[in-house]
Image (cartoon, rainbow, N blue to C red):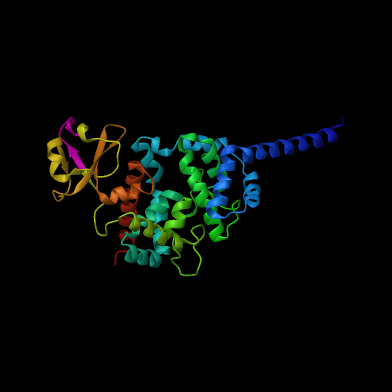
Amino acid sequence: MNRFTSLVFLIVLLLFAHQSVSAAFVDRPEVQEFINEMVVQHKFDAAVLTETLSKVKLSKSIIKAISRPAETKPWYQYRDIFLTKNRIKLGVKFLQENEQALRRAEQTYGVPVEIIVAIIGVETRYGKHAGGYKVINSLSTLAFNYPKRSRFFRSELKQFFLLAREQHIDPHSAMGSYAGAMGIPQFISSSYRNYAVDFDGDGFIDIWNNPVDAIGSVGNYFRKHGWQTGKEVAVRAEVADDRYLAVLSKGLEPHIRAADLADYGITAASALADDTPVKFLEFELKDGSEFWLGLDNFYVITRYNHSALYAMAVYQLAEEILTRYKVQNKP
């Protein structure tokens, strides 16, 4: 067998192997069940859906990525990812370039300009890094090869197909994160369908390329999740002794009354009404800890990403952007 013949044979073998893997994926019982559900519940064409899923490429790198999220880092390392001079500088630039849309979103949804900017800054560095994975590959991999959260991602895969049909999107053209989040604000499929808005009124919702739609969509997301206009997000706290350990918990929702903080040796840095619900938070530093009280709006930020580290990064980035913006725009 000469070199040319060997090369042709190898190519044919690889193509056959890829087809076999694809066929094996589509033929899996749980995938067939998914196809049947989409046909019965949402009137999809079985042949078209089968053809679309046969082109899916499952990825081990996606499993690895979701298994080691940044939120597993200690606060002092996590903070350094997002609270950089460059990200703050770009945040001020994004605010200035989109100020009209941001002010309108603040007026419409009650969410401060700087919070919307910070969300977009943390998620995609203001739209510059929106993800390099095919969404259909990410969601299919996690739906069928990641048992820990397969139920959730199978639901998101269903939402993605519905979204693609509604928005006339080629399922294999949509790009996003390893977890299937899309566009400038990194909405998952269900969030796209439920909260994304046509904020510029052009008749089409585009959160991939249109910052105006992305801005309005973030504002709408927060309003729908209970953002309280004009209320604080978090306040610093101090502890007198280790009594605070009794109120540390894994949950994120505020569950302690401000009036009861003194019982645990906790003091808020600014005055809070006695009936204010708070979540006591400890963040790891290189040397020691810092303490915060998360309020209702802090909890709303965690609805975007269920992590106290994430919410604190968004809050602090927002504060830094606002401070820098005010300095640059002094009368």
For the N terminus, which image quadrant?
Answer: top right
Q: Residue at x 69, y 38 (%)?
A: 18
For the C terminus, which image quadrant?
Answer: bottom left
- Part of the protein shown in magenta: 237-244
Can residue 290 be seen here? The reply is: yes
Seen as rendered, the residue at the extreme right is 2
| 139 in magenta | no
| 240 in magenta | yes
- Residue toward you, 31 or 329: 31
- Residue 68: image x %, image y %? 45, 35
- Residue 325: image x %, image y %? 34, 59
**In the image: residue 67, left or right of residue 277:** right
Can residue 134 be seen here? The reply is: no
Q: Is residue 223 above or below residue 65?
A: below
Q: Residue at x 39, y 60 (%)?
A: 95
Q: Is residue 287 above or below residue 38?
A: above
Q: Is residue 66 above or below residue 46?
A: above
Q: Residue at x 70, y 39 (%)?
A: 19
Q: Is residue 74 above or below residue 99?
A: above
- Residue 160: image x %, image y %? 52, 51
Q: Residue at x 73, y 39 (%)?
A: 15
How many numbered dots are placed on residues in this image? Answer: 0
- Residue 70: image x %, image y %? 42, 38
